[in-house]
Image (cartoon, helix red, strand yellow):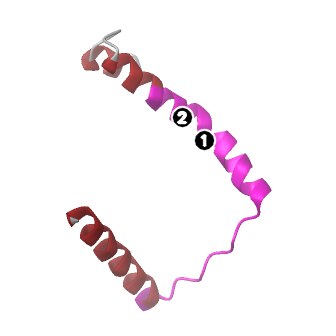
Amino acid sequence: MPAVILTVSNLTAAYLVAIKRGYPAGTFLAGTAVWRSLAAALPGLAVVAIIIVGILSACFTATESAASR
C-alpha cells in the first residue's frame, strides 16, 4: 500500500507541475513507432539483464560486473 500512495503522490505532483509550467500535451505514438523504440532499447535492456542474471547465477560478482563496462 505505501508504494501505491507514493506512486499516486508522484503522479499528482508531476501533473500539477506540468499544468503550472504550461507543458504541452504529448502526442500518442502509433504502434510502429513504439515497436521501433522498443527494438532500439533492447540492447541496453539486455545488458542489464545479463548483469543481473550473471550475479544471481554466481558466474561473477557485483564487483566484476561493474569492472566489465
Residue numbers of the magenta segment: 20-49
> Contact, CB < 8 Å: mark 1 with mark 2?
yes
Magenta segment: does it hold 13?
no
In the picture, the quarter occupied by the N terminus is: bottom left
Vertical placement of 45 versus 33: above or below? above
Side of 6 relative to 57 (left or right): left
- SS at circle 2: helix
Image coordinates for residue 50, horizontal then vertical, percent: 46, 23
Image coordinates for residue 48, horizontal then vertical, percent: 44, 31
Magenta segment: does it hold 41?
yes
Q: State the image quarter where residue 64 is shown.
A: top left
User: Toward the viewer: 48 or 19?
Assistant: 48
Side of 39 relative to 8 (left or right): right
- Badge 1: how crowded within 10 Å, few (<14), some, or many (20+)? few
Vertical placement of 49 versus 36: above or below? above
In the picture, the quarter occupied by the C terminus is: top left
From the image, tell me which residue sits under label 1: 41
Q: State the image quarter where residue 39 is shown.
A: top right
Side of 33 relative to 13 (left or right): right
From the image, tell me which residue sits under label 2: 44
User: Toward the viewer: 69 or 26?
Assistant: 26
Which residue type does callout 1 highlight?
A: Ala
